[in-house]
Image: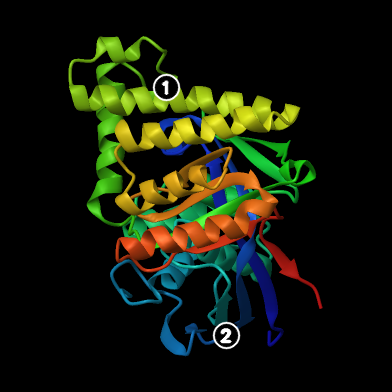
Amino acid sequence: MNEVREWTVPGRVNLIGEHLDYNGGAVLPIAIDRAVTIKIRARDDGAVNVWSGGRRASFSADVAPGDVTDWSAYVAAAVWASRDADIAVPGADIVIESTLPTGAGLSSSAALTCGIAAAFDELAGTGLSRVDLARIGQRAESDFVGAPVGLMDQLAVLCSEPEHALHIDFATDVPALTPVPATWAEAGLAVAVIDTHAHHELASGEYGARRDECTRAAEQLGLSLLAQAQVDAVLKLEDELLKRRTRHVVTESARVRGAVKALNAGEWTQFGTMLTASHESLREDFQVSSPELDVAVETALEAGALGARMTGGGFGGSAIALLPAESVDDLRSRAAARFAALDWPAPDVFVVTPTAGAHRVRR
């Protein structure tokens, strides 16, 4: 009962396929080598104590939505969703550490909720699948915290493999997961993250509004999910806003298919072109970019990137760039200068590599 177990749960970068998971499309994320570390020890008194960054919070293992609204809400959400999935949660002491920036669009919340669910699953000996654990993490965010997220982030942080992207197809009830080799380092390239520090909050209204708009478009087209739309779907809609949302979903789905082929073939120029086209679609048709993200992408292209785009839900957060490894320092200095000229906080620029999904650290 007193054994301390440690879990490492990575963040994720979505290479391409933004806002497609909840539309029944396909996405292409990687788990990254920045992670949340969860140290957990079971208790038998029904109390949950959480320590993180010098803060402490306590609540009951019988916590319910609305009971916890402070910084520990995501932990409470994971406890609630785990118990609701019939995982026996007796209480726990939990210590959380992280090398993953929060609010940067790199799935720190999914890493936290899924990691706690996985830890409780192991403690209780429930033996749920990674897909089941992903659904617990999703429910924690959507039904407890109030962020209507899709399932991509949770699957990425739980199911990814080292040196691979994870193609996730949401066309079926049980998503199809296919690892895709991610070998850009062998070609002298790197994927750099540009954390703009324009932090986003998906529990706010804009993300939910996009989901609602996509649902309305699908209904008007007679579809159950918008990613089922064909290339002529835009011509069948009258509402200009819904046309734009549909055009993004249709073209982004095509870009994901092309990106998988480019990754498999090592066609890096083609892959980069699709990244930039994805950003343009997210900026113009889906309208989820921000001035900081647009400047980050422009700066990356000026620094010699083969392609760049925002990543994550949008409205702030991070951009990514595929560029020669030797150009990362130039990108960092250019981005700092551009942001300083606009009186914005200096962005963080760092390289990420594809890594394994959540796993227990054996000592």
Q: Is residue 54 visible?
A: yes
- 66 vs 50: above or below: above
Disc 2 or 1, which lies upstream in sequence? 2
Relative height, residue 206 to residue 26 (above, below): below
Instruction: Report x, y in % for residue 352.
Output: 64, 56
Numbered marks: total? 2
Most extreme residue toward the left is: 239
On the image, which quarter does residue 273 sit in? Answer: top right
- What percent of the width, then of the height, locates residue 18? 45, 38
- Residue at numbered disc 1: 250
Q: Are marks 2 and 1 in contact (CB under 8 Å)?
A: no
Query: Under tag 2, what secondary structure?
Result: loop
326 sits to left or right of 95: right
Quarter-of-image position of residue 139: bottom left
Question: Label 2, label 1: how many angstroms apart (C-alpha)?
Answer: 51 Å
Report the residue at 31% width, 33% height from top: 284
Q: Is residue 124 left or right of residue 278?
A: right
The answer to whether residue 311 is above or below residue 199 is above
- In the drawing, what numbered circle is on residue 44? 2
From the image, state whether disc 2 or disc 1 is nearer to you: 1
Q: Name the spot of residue 197 as percent of width and height, x first.
A: 39, 64
